[in-house]
């Protein structure tokens, strides 16, 4: 399996749907994630969720 630890992922639409799932998985795999979304409040919630995990 390919190693993703310490790689960087830029994820658009990260506050919901597929983008949210990708962001969670990327963070779980040890990647540094850059999140973007037009829904600012939802994006902040996602950021807090990832910080806790």
Image: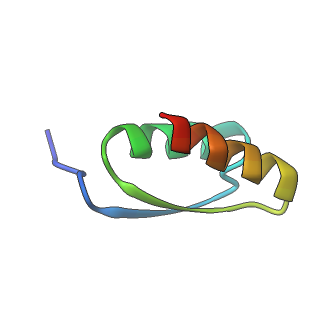
Q: Is residue 23 left or right of residue 44?
A: left
**Left or right placement of residue 30 versus residue 33 in this view:** left
Give the camera-side residue of 2 and 27: 27
Q: Is residue 39 visible?
A: no
Q: Which part of the image, by quadrant, shows the N terminus?
A: top left
Identity of the residue drawn at 31% across and 46% down: 30
> Which of the colour schemes (rainbow, by chain, secondary structure, one colour) is used?
rainbow
Label total for image: 0
Quarter of the view holding residue 18: top right
- Residue 8: x percent and y percent? 37, 65
The residue at 54%/42% (across/down) is 50
Q: Is residue 14 left or right of residue 33?
A: right
Measuring from the top left, give residue 25's x and y in whole percent.
44, 37
Residue displayed at 62% across by 37% down:
49
Q: Is residue 8 left or right of residue 43?
A: left
User: Residue 45: in sight, yes or no?
Assistant: yes
Point 75% across, 52% down: residue: 44
In the rendered image, the residue lying farthest to the front is 52
Image location (x, y in percent) of residue 4: 24, 51
On the image, the x and y values in percent for residue 51 come to 53, 44
Res 7 → quadrant = bottom left
């Amino acid at each position: 399996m390919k190693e993703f630890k310490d790689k960087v992922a830029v994820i658009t639409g990260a506050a919901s749907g597929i983008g949210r799932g990708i962001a969670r998985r990327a963070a779980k795999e040890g990647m540094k994630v850059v999140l973007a979304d037009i829904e600012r409040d939802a994006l902040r919630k996602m950021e807090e969720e990832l910080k806790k995990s």
